[in-house]
Every structure is written in C-alpha cells, then in structure tokens.
Image (cartoon, rainbow, N blue to C red):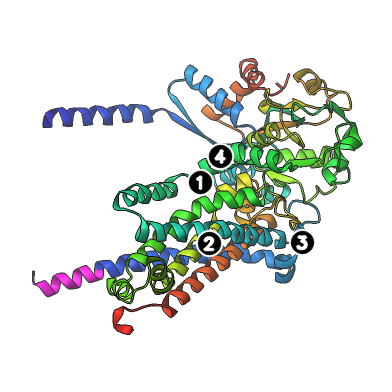
Amino acid sequence: MSRKFKEIIIKNVFFFFALVSIFILGLIVVFLFREGLPIFKVVSVKDFIFGNEWYPTYDPPDFGIWPLIVGSIIVTLFSSLIAVPLGILSAIYVSEIASPLMKEILKPAIELLAGLPSVVLGFFGMVVLAPWLQETFDLPTGLNIVNVSIILAIMAVPTISSISEDALYSVPREFKEASYALGATRFETIAKVIVPAALSGISTAVILGMARAIGETMVVLMVAGGAAAIPESIFDSVRPMPASIVAEMGEAPFQSDHYHALFATGAALFFMTLFFNLIADYISTKFKEVGSATL
Amino acid sequence: MMRVLVLSFMCLMLGWGAASAGETIVIKGSTTVLPVAQAAAEAYMKKHPEVNISLSGGGSGNGIKALIDKSTDIANTSRFIKGKEIKLAVEKGSYPVPHRVAIDAIVPIVHPENPVTDLTIEQMSLIYQGKIKNWKEVGGKDKRIVVVSRDTSSGTYEVWAKKVLHKARVTPRAQLQASNGAIVQVISKNSYAIGYIGLGYLNRSVKTIKVSGIEATVQTALSGTYPIARPLFMFTNGWPKGTVSDFINFVVSPEGQKIVKKEGFVPLY
C-alpha cells in the first residue's frame, strides 16, 4: 500500500466521522424544532417568549416563558460574577506564580471539581448550603438565586480555570522575557503583558463557563427553588429553563401543547447557548494573537 | 489457561441463556406508584423465579407514552389517562385498560417546629394561591409562608389542584419541586415552609397537618372521610393476558394489598 493511498484512506475516515457527528447534530436540531414549533399554533411567538404566566396544565393554559428566561439569565450572570474572578485568578496563580510543587497539587484539585457529578453538588446545595444561608441571613428560603449561583460557580470554575490556564501557558516566552528585560515587575508583566496576550483564550473560557451554567439541569432543578416568577431580590427562588423542562417533561402528555411548549423552551435555550458560543468564537478570532511574529 | 477461559465463557453464555428463557414484564411510569410496583415485583419474582420484571420510573405521562408506543407492558400512573392520550392510543391501535391497584392520600406537611396542627381546605387553598402570606394568619408564628408544591404536571399536583385549589392557580412564587422526596427534604430543613406529599413518603423529619381536623391515615382514607385521596393505576394495553394478567392479579390480591399497605399506601379493601 503506497503512502499516498494510506493518506487518502485516513483522510476519508476522519471526514466520514466528522460528517456523521454533524449529521447527528443536524437530526437533533430538526427533532427539537419539529417537536417545538407546533406550540406556535396555540400561542404567538411574542406571547410565548414575553408572556409572564407559565401555567401549562391549566384550562385555559398559559405558555409564557419570560420568568424562566429571566431566571436562567440572572442565575448565569450571578454565577459568572463569582466564577470568573475565581477561575481566572486561580489560572494566573497556577500558571505564573505557584511553585512547581504547589502547581502539582492545585491543578489536579481544580480539575477534580469538574469531575464531581452535578447531582452531588446539587445535594450539597440542598442540605448544607440552603439551611446555612437561611439561618445566616434569616431568609424564608435557602433555595434561592445566591445558593444556585454559588453551586453553578463551583461547576464553572474548573472550565474557566483550565481553559484560561492553557491560554496563559501558550503566551510565547519571549513576551515575558522582554518584559522582565525592560525592568517590569512580576505583577506588571502578568497584568500588562501575559493576560492581555491571552485575552482571546480567557474570554473563550469565560463564555464556555457561562454556557455550562446556563445549560446545567440537575443543580438548578435541586437548588433554584423553582418559582416561575420574576425575582424581586437575589434571595428569591427562580426557575431556570432546564429545570422546567426536566421537571415537567416526564408528566407532559405525549404531543400535547405542554409537550410542544417544553420542546420550544428547549429550542429557546438552544438559541441562547448558540449565541454564547458564537460570541466566544467571534472573540477568540478577533483577539487572536498569532504569535510573537505579529508584534 | 485458554481452555478455562473458553469454559467460563460458555458457562456464562449458558447462564445467560437460562435466565433469558423466562418471561419478561416491562413496567414504566409514575414515581408515586414506583415503591408499590417495586415491592410487588420483588415478591412476585420470588414466587415465580422464571419471570423477570424490569421496572423504571419517569412519570405517569412517560408511562402512558411507553404504553402507546408498546415499549412497556404495564404503565403505572398516579392519575387517570387523559382524553388526548386515549385519542393518540386509539390512533396507534392501542386500547389502554386501567387497573386500580391502591389508594394514596395526599398529606400537607410542615417543619416539626411549626406550631400549626390543623388547616381547613379553604385556608390551604388561600395559602397556595398566595393570598394568605403569613403563618400568624392561620394561628402560627409571625413568619412568611413559603409555599412548596409539586411541579404543575405531576399527578400529585393535579389531585391537589382539583381537591384543594378547586382549579385556582397556584401562586407563581411557589417553590416547585420535582419529586415527593425533594419536598420532604425541603420541608424538613425549612421552618417557614408548607408542602404536600403522598402518604407513602411520610417520615419523622416532617410534621403532618390535619385537614379540617381529620388526620390522614389508612383508615380515614379508606373510609373516605379524609378529603384529599386518589386512586393509583396500572394501565395495560388491552385486557392483560398470561403473565401480565397474573402479575396484576397478584397486586390486587390480599397478598399484594398487604404490600401496598406496608409501603405506606392505602389498600383497596
């Protein structure tokens, strides 16, 4: 078998598998829309997205997912507020400041967090964090935005931290050396040279972390409290979209309006995560440092 | 070495062949009925080792869905089949047949520290609609009431909406939990909260509330004096035959009903 022939086979095998995964993804999207679209015969797109009332099983029903969308967005923003500084600073510490021994300990420890099953974290939020929050702040309920954001942040930190660390690690050595040669301190080098150079990777990390938080199901089901109302304070319960879908799908009669409404909610969620990923893609191409040659 | 491997492999194959020779019953559906079905299936398989029962939860709606798709023999439900589901079933050539297997009482629960012991249906209705907001309005401490409910599509919720709320809408501020177990978990940790669960899920971490002076027990539910009760069903596709029929007969037999009672539900007789 000639070398060229081998190359062609290998290329085609990879091409085939890439095609298969794209095809499967396409089928999933088609299915999502085929099952979701019929709801718009019952309710207009505007009333579905901006409607304030989610009463899918009543007669007459109301299919307004605005409180669910708001719940998802608030929880995502709040958890990023906690996870982004933690994730990026820990990445900077591990890649630039920590001693080799510290690095050996910290890196796997952070990655271990990613390995924790979400149901375990959810249970922790439910039986440990919720009563603690309730007592400490004298709240009516501990299952609220703060609780779910903390747990989601714990889940997003490993994603943000490890991708940021890769970005920091791939900043060419010459940058650092040049900075030190000019007499810059370590802090100045990190803040003004290394982090800006890694910005595209760090932004991708942040957005992927947020995408993880917005799509998370088990944690929001267990600790968000599940109230389908626009929250008035950060200690109110909310009902993000994935929690709604997973809680109700099991009991929704097959191909009923409720069933279609849940798929349409899934489609809305799909657009939101798609939006996040497009931003991530745009940022990473826009701020891409091709290498030291571009300077 | 090789011979040992081959031999053990053959033994495995034989064992597997023997196990799969018996009959298999597939049961899917309501998580409320699950403990009953689980215990009944174990007892039945002990008596009939040749029968293999595979059991999974997933909700009444999913059970019916599986029955219509013919991917299950028995669908457990905590509610009656809906008109739309019957229509779909008939279109696909299935004829769902209900079998009442147990009665479940739905019990309001609060945190053990809550001094309130008795509420009327009317009071609970107002609490769940968000019109009574503080425990002191119903004779408790001056604390906000945290309303905990099952999600609106659960069978338990449906009975609650019908018998307590009289179809009024539950307040959107209510915390919705996805299972009986989750409600017990939340109530046991929160002295502000009120919730409701199936009788089978009661335990000591929560306190039951009497409904207009009537306590939910097997006796009061059976006699009909306890107002929030409902039947639990197993649906089959057409009249059951063979092993499936035998299993359902077992569940409704005096022996099966003893299991129902042991699991905390109310037997049929």
Q: Specify whether disc 4 shares its chain with disc 1.
A: yes
Residue identifier under label 3: A52
Tell me the tag on residue A210: 2
Residue at the far front in the pictured view: A183
User: Circle 4 sits in a helix, a strand or a loop, which is it?
Assistant: helix
Q: Disc 4 or 2, which lies upstream in sequence?
A: 4
Give the spatial CA distance, label 4 vs label 2. Answer: 21 Å
Classify mark 3: residues with Cα within 10 Å, few (<14), some (14-19) or many (20+): some
Magenta stretch prevailing secondary structure: helix
**Residue type for callout 2:** Met
Q: Quadrant of the C terminus of chain A?
A: bottom left
Q: Is residue A72 left or right of residue B14?
A: right
Residue A55 visible, this angle: no
Instruction: Specify the segment rendered in magenta.
Output: A2-12
Give the spatial CA distance, label 3 vs label 1. Answer: 29 Å
Q: Position of residue A8 (x, y in %)?
A: 19, 73
Q: Chain of mark 1?
A: A
Q: Is residue A170 left or right of residue B188?
A: left
Residue B40 visible, this angle: yes
**Residue type for callout 4:** Phe
Give the spatial CA distance, label 4 vs label 1. Answer: 10 Å
Tell me the tag on residue A118: 1
Q: Specify whether disc 4 shares its chain with disc 3.
A: yes
Q: Disc 4 or 1, which lies upstream in sequence?
A: 1
